[in-house]
């Protein structure tokens, strides 16, 4: 009996030792990964290349966009021109006369540009009424040299507007150019009135313009390149772009066709619009008059109708007189006889100046 009990004890103890060994072995074989925190400098080490690459990409995109915007701006500057009704600025000299840019029309084939130059009363009294008495100067850029340009300037009657025509057999680029206009008659009168015996010749004019275009020294002592400001004639200039002009439905073979396209047809169209507007007002006025007369017929004491009726009749009468006058003007324009060489005598010669940019600030 004792022997059996001892055997059982030994057996139990042996089983406990076996379980204990298994637990120890299990603990030994199980691997616990320690928690590792990446240092901040190591994180930046990996992020910095990405930030650098993104920065370079953004700089490239910005540079391309800026370059594109500059190119667009330059294109707009090169193509920009003076608008209808703009007063022609002075490049040099002084005068109280005012010239204004009128209609600009481009022929159907795109090879001839016609420009109207309007004169105010002072200009008609102080400037020549003949195109031949003007000097013409053309200012262009290297990208738009216009070597084949044919420029002419004439006047539509002695009390009318000036007409500038610029022809290019190869057509026009979508870029601006400058035309200067100098009155030769004004130069003669100025020279005659000079008290110091000095004169302002054609060479002086060209040297003065060249000096300003080249941004020459304002204190240049050369008397041949710059005269006293009081002797400088008024030099008007206009900035033009044929692509900004109204397109004609026809080509022109003589002055009469140019004048009709530039003045006559457009004036007739504008006057006809005014006539149609006034006729519509007259119709509305007559309808209102009928209403007021009907009111008075029903109620002779209607004060509103009594007050409005004479005013309405007077307004309609005034409008009808205006329509009659406008219609006579339209009929006169339609039936006017215009010579084929109505703009003669013209100035047909010019000198050309080549500059880097038309963004020129006059001194």
Image: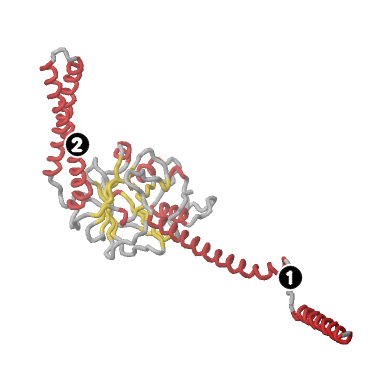
Q: Position of residue 181 (x, y in %)?
A: 35, 50
Which of the 4 image quarters holds residue 15? Answer: bottom right
Viewer-proximal residue among 292 and 187: 292
Q: Is residue 203 left or right of residue 215?
A: left
Q: Position of residue 251 (x, y in %)?
A: 19, 58
Pointer 2 residue: 277
Q: Is residue 36 left or right of residue 119?
A: right
| 94 lies above or below 18 | above
Where disc 1 sits, the SS reads: loop
Viewer-proximal residue among 58 and 280: 58
Pointer 1 residue: 36
Q: Position of residue 98 (x, y in %)?
A: 35, 40
Residue 340, numbered label: none
Q: Is residue 172 left or right of residue 311?
A: right
Viewer-proximal residue among 188 and 208: 208
Between tags 2 and 1, which lies in front? 1
Q: Quadrant of the N terminus?
A: bottom right
Badge 1 crowding class, 10 Å Cα cut-off, few under 14, some 14 to 19, many 20 or more, is few
Q: Is residue 314 left or right of residue 223?
A: left
Q: How many numbered marks appear?
A: 2
| 279 lies above or below 190 | above
Which of the 4 image quarters holds residue 333? Answer: top left
């Amino acid at each position: 009996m004792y022997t059996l009990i001892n055997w059982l004890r030994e057996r139990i103890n042996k089983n406990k030792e076996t379980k204990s060994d298994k637990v120890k072995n299990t603990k030994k074989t199980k691997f616990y990964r320690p928690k590792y925190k990446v240092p901040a400098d190591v994180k930046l080490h990996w992020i910095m290349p990405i930030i650098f690459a993104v920065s370079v990409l953004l700089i490239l995109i910005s540079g391309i966009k800026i370059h594109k915007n500059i190119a667009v701006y330059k294109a707009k500057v090169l193509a920009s021109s003076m608008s209808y009704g703009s007063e022609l600025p002075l490049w040099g000299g002084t005068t109280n006369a005012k010239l204004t840019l009128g209609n600009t029309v481009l022929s159907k084939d795109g090879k001839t540009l016609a420009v109207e130059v309007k004169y105010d009363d002072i200009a008609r009294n102080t400037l020549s009424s003949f195109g031949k008495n003007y000097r013409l100067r053309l200012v262009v850029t290297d990208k738009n040299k216009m070597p084949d340009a044919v420029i002419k300037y004439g006047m539509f009657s002695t009390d009318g507007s000036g007409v500038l025509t610029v022809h290019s057999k190869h057509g026009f680029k979508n870029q601006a150019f400058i035309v200067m206009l100098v009155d030769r008659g004004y130069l003669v009168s100025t020279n005659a009135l000079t008290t110091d015996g000095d004169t302002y010749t054609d060479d002086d004019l060209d040297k003065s313009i060249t000096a300003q275009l080249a941004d020459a020294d304002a204190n240049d002592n050369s008397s041949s390149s710059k005269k006293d400001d009081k002797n400088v004639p008024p030099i008007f200039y206009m900035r033009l772009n044929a692509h900004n002009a109204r397109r004609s439905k026809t080509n022109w073979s003589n002055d009469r066709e140019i004048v009709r396209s530039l003045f006559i047809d457009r004036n007739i169209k504008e006057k006809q619009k005014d006539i149609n507007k006034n006729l519509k007002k007259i119709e509305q006025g007559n309808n209102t008059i009928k209403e007021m007369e009907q009111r008075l017929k029903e109620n002779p004491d209607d004060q509103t109708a009594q007050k409005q009726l004479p005013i309405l009749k007077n307004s309609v009468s005034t409008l009808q007189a205006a329509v009659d006058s406008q219609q006579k003007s339209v009929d006169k324009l339609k039936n006017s006889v215009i010579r084929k060489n109505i703009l003669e005598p013209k100035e047909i010669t010019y000198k050309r100046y080549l500059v880097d940019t038309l963004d020129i600030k006059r001194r």
